[in-house]
Each structure stands twice: as C-alpha cells, then as structure tokens.
Image (tube, helix red, strand yellow):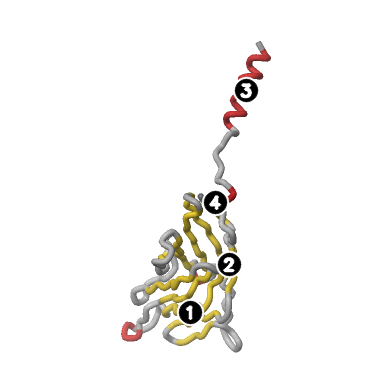
Amino acid sequence: MHSSIFTAFIGLVATSLALPTASPSALPTTTNFTVRAFYASLAAPDAPVAYQQQSWADFIIDDGDYNTLCTVMSKPNEALYSTYKYYPCEKEDSDPDVSFSFRISKNFRELEVKKTWNSNGTYLTGFATQETHWKEGESGNVTVSEYGKLYQRFGMWNFEITRLIG
C-alpha cells in the first residue's frame, strides 16, 4: 500500500516539474544598451500661471542593432513621472518586432526602460533601471531656475536588462 502511494507521489512530482521553457536561442544576444543625449526639464510646480512650463524628456536608446528616439511632454505643471504607465519611444519601420518604452520615477530618481522584441517567434520583454544621480551646482548636470530644472547627461549611460519576461 505504501509503495503505491509513493509511486503515485513520485509520478505527480515528475509531471509537476515538467514545465515548458524557452529555448536558449530565444534569449537576446545582448542584454545591454545605452541611453545618450539625455535632456529633461521639470517645470517648477509653483511658477506663476504666466510662466508655467511643460515638463519633458528627450533621449536616444542604442542597443547596437537598433536606435530609437524617446520623448514625452506633459501639460503645464503636470507631473512627468509615472508609477505604472510607460511612454512609448518612436517605432522603427526597419524592425517592427522591436520596441522601447520608458517611465520616470517620482522626483526623477530613476529611469526605467522596457524593451520588447520577437526572438525566433518568442516575444520577450526586458526591463532595465538606473538611478539618475543628479547633481546641482558647479560641475553638476542639473541647472536650476525659477521656472524649473533642466537635467542633462552627456556621453553614454549604460543600462543592463535585469528582469526578463517571455
């Protein structure tokens, strides 16, 4: 009696562990990309009505095979950050199976980029997040005025996909 229960248990475990997996060829050849020419402006929330500005962000993503322009603009004095919404980057006609989108955290502390692509028939979505490390003042990368803040990042900003869904 105990041996039949044990055999049934082993059979149940064996079938439970037989999960489908993506083939190794479906994984990306590289999980790195760069953000360059990054500029963003966050409007001062307390600016007089006559001087209210739009917040915006504008940058280029380059993953070696694919380049795209990412841009977003808010309404005057509207927040640019998003907890759940990703802003889409421009879609390249040359590769319709690749797309990028992004979101900016509150207080502009992080930039998260989402890449979606088709790899041998398997759609994958990868996420990469970097802290912004902004610095105001002399030799900083943030310019402060009464109308808001201008953020600039010169050179390459390296990102690595750390979460992958597919």
Q: Nearer the viewer, mark 4 or mark 1?
A: 4
**Residue type at numbered disc 4:** Ala
Q: Nearer the viewer, mark 4 or mark 3?
A: 4
Q: Earlier in the sequence, mark 4 or mark 1?
A: 4
In the image, 120: left or right of 12?
left
What is the distance, in whole Å, between disc 3 and disc 1 at their CAs?
59 Å
The residue wearing badge 3 is 9
* Extreme residue toward the bottom, this view: 138
What is the distance, in whole Å, between disc 4 and disc 2 at their CAs?
20 Å
Q: Residue 3: image x %, image y %?
A: 68, 14
Q: Secondary structure at mark 1?
A: strand
Q: Are marks 2 and 3 in contact (CB under 8 Å)?
A: no
Q: Earlier in the sequence, mark 2 or mark 3?
A: 3
In the picture, the disc for residue 26 is 4
Q: Residues within 10 Å of mark 4 (few under 14, many from 20)?
A: some
The residue wearing badge 1 is 39
Q: Are marks 4 and 1 in contact (CB under 8 Å)?
A: no
**Residue type at numbered disc 1:** Tyr
Q: Residue 68: image x %, image y %?
A: 45, 71
Q: Residues within 10 Å of mark 2 (few under 14, many from 20)?
A: many
The residue wearing badge 2 is 159
